[in-house]
Image (spheres, coloured by chain):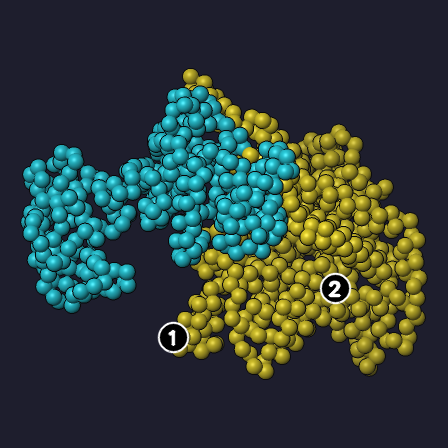
Amino acid sequence: MADGQLASRLAGVLRPRINGQALTTLAVLVIVGFLVLLPLVFLVEESLNVGDPMAFPPVEFGIANYISIFSEDFKTVWNTLVIAVMATVMAIVIGFVLAWILTRTNVPGREKLERLMELPYYMTPLVGALAWAVIAGPKSGFINQIWKAMGGTSDIADIYTHFGIAWVMALFEGTVAFVMISASMKSMDPALEESARVMGASKLRTTLTVTLPLVMPGVLGAMLFVFAEMLGSFAAALVLGIPGRIYVITTAIWDSTLAYPPDYGRASAMGLALFVVMFGMLTFYRRVINRGSFATITGKAFRPRPMDMGRMAWVLFSICALYIALAVVFPIAALLMTSLQRFATVILGQAQWTLANYELALSLGPVRTALLNSIMLGLGVATVGVVIMALLVWIIYRSKLWGRGAIEYLVMFPQAVPRLVFGLALLWAWLNIPIGIYGTLWLLALAYFTVMLPLGVRTLAGVVLQIDKSLEECARVCGASWGYQMRTVTLPLLKPGILAAWLLIFMACVRELGASAFLQGPHAKVIAPSIVNAFATSGTELTAAMALIQTFTVILALIILFRVARGMTKELQ
Amino acid sequence: MSSTSNVRIEVKDLVIRYGDQTAVNGVSFTVGRGEHVTLLGPSGCGKTTTLRAIAGLEQPSAGSIHVDGVAMYDASKRANVPTEQRGVSMVFQSYAVWPHMTVFDNVAYGLRVRKQSQSEIKANVEKALDLVQMRHLADRGASKLSGGQQQRVALARAIAFSPTVVLFDEPLSNLDAKLRAEMRVELRELQRRLDITSVYVTHDQEEALAISDRVIVMNVGVIEQIGTPEAIYNRPTSRFVADFVGSANLIKGRVTGPDTFTTDGGTILKFKSPHAPTGQETEVAVRTAYIDLRGQDGDNQLPGHVRQRMFHGDFVQYIIECAAGRLIVRRPPVNLLEEGAPVTVSFSPEHTVLLQR
């Protein structure tokens, strides 16, 4: 009776859209769920494995792996915390100072500087870490070379330390802090500050009593977010931590799978623990953001009237320039110099210039294949991915389908899983699933697509949400079917967003390290792990050449694409 | 109902729920052929939701919507015609002019969907653009238009494919006051010329009264009153309508005879009502424009004095202190009275409206 009622009500709800749309939702939920959640289930199973680490599936279960995190691996946990805290503090301080300078003061060249702030993000932590290893490594690091040339006897710089790792993380992964804090500064109504000035408060007093309390929730949110990121950070700790035997959780996970026999149980337990902590932090972050403590944030972007800093403006300019120098100019220059020499030296008189490193990098079969594989994966995943993500975005933010909230949650879920842990989970899942894509590029493609879901969907959603819903509704009212409306209205309007998402995904794929580290097979190598490998086994000179080849490949691809895109938009006009 | 009847749109017992919130709660009305009906109410009253349900952009939970006798939505018959097959047209609040197309392409959209020939499309688009005086901008990109121009394009697009029903969702709310007044005149003109049936949604009571044949006043998901603009203004049935449409003084008290009302202060007022009072009524409404200050013969004469005077330009607003309480009175801006001056307030029983709710 009640079942009958429910069934008829359900039929009533579903009937108008029975033309495949309800089935689409179900199919999407199942597929995305399969991609996103299933690997974690396998990871949980393995983390409880206390028997033979090579047994698939495990036969003996227990929580010993979790307990050992706090006994045997306590040092690792401690390292992780110390580095994450240092990196977060540095990232927030840098982000806050830069955000304040660039949104609140009349620093010269403000708009150009603001655009330059994106560059460290495009550098990636891996390239940044390699560069800083060249600049500030012990003994042969450039700083130490100069110091000794000036008469110094011992090293003055060592990047292979807790502080060094945190420093590189803050420089190259902390840029998100700047973005978040300046967003909260920009969205503050300048009238709030102006009224304080009108009441007779000085600039300093206004900043302390009005500006600071108002942006505090934004800063706190950024702090939580950045801290979660730093806990899951891998590249800097891998490059800079291993030589000095400073392990953090991510590198410990990596290390325990390389041991013989590989201790997947221990790696899985650490990965899950890390995931739970990160997930908790990000959930807390979302609560902070959603609690409405941002009374100042109305969604409207204000252009605050900048404060006139007088001569101080040039001091502020130097601060910005110093940041760009530390995060972009010096690293790129150091890598360039290293890659062009037989033995890296900063003392120009001793330099032996050569192109041999580039020749070697490009002639080495594995390097060339890895680079080609990465580019192919980037092209494929970006192209196919963007189409699927656009469809997902439309379902989540535009359709009235039942269950679209669940889809959104699932799609955004990989954001809360550290890349490396996700790679481990996928590895484990596809060792167990009897479909033979383990060790092939297909598994990498699948992994890339899954971990890029939040990035792509967020980028596309930003554009979709800007497009007024009535633009689409109007097409329907004019008599257009769903397909016709998509073709004539929705997709043309989405074009710039689709292009942007394609670019971001392509770049992220070519530089992917965390998930690739576990998933590349002997016959399916990709470039980022190969660079790490070269750093560990060959000289810095070759590694620098490879890192720069990767960077310039991405830049080249971007230039070509922008050309094509500009041609396309010209055609439109 | 047959399609030859004079009814173009029939909405019956319409209910629209979002989760556990009810946006529209049992709304019924009809719109005749060639009639211009306005749904009027404050934001959140369900007027836009009702309009969008007619267009098929909202999914009702119960009730029915018929256009020309055809069930567009009928919960009992499980009928639900998709938006694009309903043949109704709509002008959106945000105009929804597609920025990636020219003015011509925007207006031609509905014609292309209907697979008209190139020559027909050209002729119809030009006709529609002529009606809104936008033909000279046909090749302009839509993103380069001003607000008023976009408004005109949206209008031309909505009428270009000769729909029988056009829905208007607050089309003038984004224009400045001056342009709004102009467009109001043009819209009224266009409605008359094209013989279309229209349903118009607005929260602006002045606009509703000005451009409609009939007004439907809505509040919290239900209809408060349906009537001609004159009836809504002169004979509001509820406190909400009296208060929301125009400006009125609401005086509390109780009914003490077939045509007498005693205020809480003990003043006896005469009223005229088409319905016999039930005795449960607690308020009468007197429009601010219908109160005279010169003192005349007849009923409802109250002595008082001017407490405050505000000069508005088109009218002067006085606040008068009298036995019935504080009354707001709006008079033409001539023969100004000083603050403190003694006056005699008078209003006829016709304009003393007994409110049923």
Q: Which of A323 and B116 is in front in this view?
A: B116
Q: How crowded is mark 1: few (under 14 residues within 10 Å), some or many (20 or more)?
A: few
Mark drawn on residue A199? 1
- Amino acid type of the residue that numbered disc 1 sits on in the rendered structure: Met
Element type at marker 1?
loop
Residue at 80% x, 40% y is A441
Identify residue type, mark 2.
Tyr
Q: How far apart are marks 1 and 2 (CA)?
A: 52 Å
Q: Are marks 1 and 2 on the same chain?
A: yes
Instruction: Give the side of residue A500 with respect to residue A334, left or right.
Output: left
Which residue is at 68% across, 66% downward?
A116
The chain that hosts pointer 2 is A
Q: Which mark is residue A408?
A: none
User: In what element is the residue under mark 2?
Assistant: loop
Nearer to me, B328 or A159? B328
Look at 47% across and 64% down and name the residue there: A189
Query: Where residue A276 appears, x then y in whole percent?
Result: 59, 46
Q: Which chain is yellow?
A: A
Image position of B204 with respect to B337: above or below: above
Residue identifier under label 2 = A160
Do the numbered discs 1 and 2 sit on residues whose CB atoms are within 8 Å? no
Considering only order in the chain, which callout, 2 or 1, is on the residue closer to the N terminus? 2
Q: Is residue B227 visible?
A: yes
Q: Residues within 10 Å of mark 2 (few under 14, many from 20)?
A: many
Residue A163 image position (x, y, % from top left): 68, 65
Name the tint of chain B in the rendering.
cyan
Q: Mark 1 lies on which chain?
A: A
